[in-house]
Amino acid sequence: MDGRGTTSEDLTARTRIRDAALLEFAEHGVRGATIRGIAAAARVSVGLVQHHFGTKEQLREACDAHALETIRRTKQRAFDEGMGDPGFMAMAVEVALPIQRYMARALVDGSPAAAQLFDDAVAFTEELLASGAPGMGTPNTSDLHAYAAVMTGMNVGLMVLHEHLSRALGADTLSREGYRRLALAILDINDDRLMSPEIVAHARAALQQLPAAGTGGGSDAE
């Protein structure tokens, strides 16, 4: 028992309930998941779920907080140890994939944690790009924040669209098999430069000259 009167059995039950809730929320969404279903998945009584978490909304908040902390911790480890470390990759797949499944559903259903996750991911990515890391080049951009935000959006989009990507790839992208194929494709895309420097330069110049709405360049109201 700790100083707050919490036993190790309490902590084990609480963790088991939370982990079961992550899977139930990921599968059915917050609206579809029930306290009874979560209790059954965790192999505990409904009363014990309510004892530890109170309402379903409070349980969802606990899952949100756990998901955010897990992702932050995983990203920090990637920053500290490098993504090329086999031990890190094994840990990331084991720990992050269930969390990604939960967050994918949260992003679709709408969740304060999902919004916070996106904002945190943009900030973390921008910091990483600005400070540099072993094996990473300096982004060729005059708007690092937009660069980081769009990069984050592309990565988050893979989570949201995991059902469609899984169908296209023939394997669940939130499983080891599907994730491996997805991640290898991401590496290939990041390693390739499909457009020539001339095309990029012309497109950039055209976009920079694109007038903003209300500056004489036409508008949707015309």
Image (cartoon, helix red, strand yellow):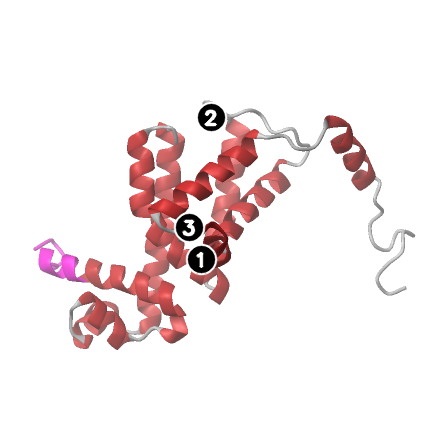
Residue 178 drawn at (x, y percent): 40, 47
Instruction: Find disc 2 in the rendering and name its residue.
Output: 133
Is 213 displayed left or right of 151 in the figure?
right
The one nearer the camera, 118 or 99, is 99
* Residue 56 inside the magenta-drawn segment: no
State how far apart marks 1 and 3 are (Cα): 12 Å
Kindly identify the amino acid type of the residue bearing the numbered disc 1: Ala
Kindly identify the amino acid type of the residue bearing the numbered disc 2: Ala
The one nearer the camera, 177 or 91, is 177
Residue 118 drawn at (x, y percent): 50, 51
What is the tally of numbered marks visible in this picture?
Answer: 3
Checking the image for residue 195, the label placed there is none
- Give the class, few, some or many, for how many residues have Cα within 10 Å of label 2's Cα (few <14, many ≥20): few
* Residue 9 inside the magenta-drawn segment: yes
Kindly identify the amino acid type of the residue bearing the numbered disc 3: Thr
Instruction: Find disc 1 in the rendering and name its residue.
Output: 104
Judged by depth in the image, the label closer to the viewer, 3 or 2, is 3
Quarter in which the C terminus is drawn: bottom right
The one nearer the camera, 131 or 32, is 32
At a point 16% along the width and 74% down the height, the residue shown is 45
Residue 108 drawn at (x, y percent): 49, 63
Which contiguous range is marked in magenta?
1-13
Checking the image for residue 173, the label placed there is 3
Is 64 displayed left or right of 8 in the figure?
right
State how far apart marks 2 and 1 are (Cα): 27 Å
Q: Residue furthest left?
A: 1
At a point 53% along the width and 52% down the height, the residue shown is 157
